[in-house]
Structure formats: C-alpha cells, structure tokens
Image (cartoon, coloured by chain):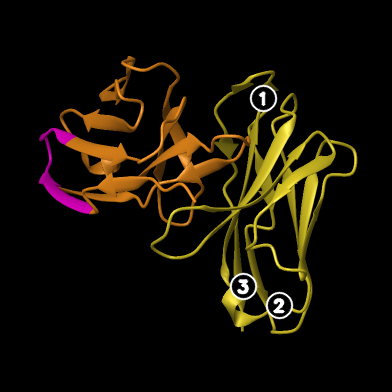
Amino acid sequence: DTGVSQNPRHKITKRGQNVTFRCDPISEHNRLYWYRQTLGQGPEFLTYFQNEAQLEKSRLLSDRFSAERPKGSFSTLEIQRTEQGDSAMYLCASSLGLRAMNTEAFFGQGTRLTVV
Amino acid sequence: GQQLNQSPQSMFIQEGEDVSMNCTSSSIFNTWLWYKQDPGEGPVLLIALYKAGELTSNGRLTAQFGITRKDSFLNISASIPSDVGIYFCASHDSGTYKYIFGTGTRLKVLA
C-alpha cells in the first residue's frame, strides 16, 4: 500500500459547476477524514467517517457539500454550485481507529480546487 | 472550540543551526502529532506522542509531550535546506475522533 491517494490533484472549475473528489485511504484504516486548507492556514476539519458511517460534520460543511463512503473503503467529496470561496486545498486523511485510542492520521497529497 | 497555538509563526535560520518550536493549548490533550507540509503537498507525519512527558526522536527531530498535557515541543538539530516548510502540531479533539491543527510554524533555512 502506497498511502492515502487523492484524485484529481488539481481541479479548475467555473463558478456554479459541481465537482467531485475521490480519496482512497490506507487499506486497513477504518477512519477517514476530510479537511480543507486555505493559503497560510492549518487544515480545517470538514467531516469524518468510521467505516461507512459519517460520524461528524463541521459547520464549514454547508449544504452544498456532501461526502460519502459507501462501502467503508474509498470516499468522495462533492461540492455543488461551486463558489469562488470554495477555492482551497482539500485534504483526505485516514487512521486505524482502535477502541478507546486514536492513532495517528496519514494524509494524502490533496486536491487543489480553483473556482474561476 | 479548542485551539492550538504555535510559536514562533515563522523562523529564518542558518543551515546547521538547531530549531525549536512549540504548540500550546488551554485544554488537556492525550495525543500530540507533529507534521511537516511542503508547498502544494499534504502534511507528512513526523512524530506522534501519546504519553505526558514522553520524549520521542525521529532522526534529527525530537518532540516532547508536555507534562501538563497542554503543550508540546519540536526540536530540529543541525538544520539542512530540506527542512524548509511549514510545521503543524495537531491533537485529538476531546470527545470526538477529529484532529485539530495548530496555526503552523514556517521555517526557512539559509544556506
């Protein structure tokens, strides 16, 4: 396994279009996270999954954003009706969640979204 | 919500110098993670700490989990040009499994 994989690496879209990003976590990891990062800032939490269940969503995740992890493996993040303010790096991470313990998270290379 | 404050915000050092940065919080945490991020890339995990007082090394990097559980330190010895990047601390938000990140320390190494 080569780590967390994200596709595409870069996406340029026109305002108002829908975009979808994919994340393939490390194979045995049951937790998957999505973060957003803007220039000069640290990653901001968007949502996370334990297997296929979406357990927490940030207030940053407006109703234009939806994330899925249908079989508890890969995940998709869709943004509908994109706005210029959605331009950011979208990061995916995964971790091996053990009962009563939170192990370290490993990140993918990110998807850079530019909305024009 | 909980916040992690990192200092300094940025550092310019000469190659070969040692570097020290820290991360503090008003809340108690059970985990501290340190990441390095290069431009246009995702964060790469450097060191993970799980126990108060723990001191862990990874090559030229050494990190410590503060005894109060409210802070952590990262030291880099004998810096080299490839140490350039942004260093983030992160911790596990209490009551959930999400990670929160610090504000970052930008390191520049002058040859």
Q: What separation in Å lies between label 3 and label 1 (alpha carbons)?
A: 29 Å
Q: Where is residue B12 in the image (x, y as percent from the top left)?
A: 14, 51
Mark earlier in primary sequence (2, 1): 2
Q: Can residue A73 be seen in this view?
A: yes
Are the residues tagged 3 and 2 within 8 Å (C-beta)? yes
Q: Position of residue B76 (x, y in %)?
A: 22, 31
Instruction: Give residue A10's quadrant in the image.
Output: bottom right
Residue carrying label 3 = A86
Chain letter, disc 2 residue: A
Q: Is the stretch drawn in magenta largely helix, strand or loop?
A: strand
Q: Circle 2 — which element?
A: loop
Give the residues in magenta: B10-19
Residue carrying label 2 = A82
Q: Circle 3 — which element?
A: helix
Are the residues tagged 3 and 1 within 8 Å (C-beta)? no
Chain B shade in the render:
orange
Location of residue B69 with respect to A13 vertically, above or below: above
Amino acid type, label 3: Asp
Chain A shade in the render:
yellow
Q: Circle 1 — which element?
A: loop
> Which label is found at residue A96?
1
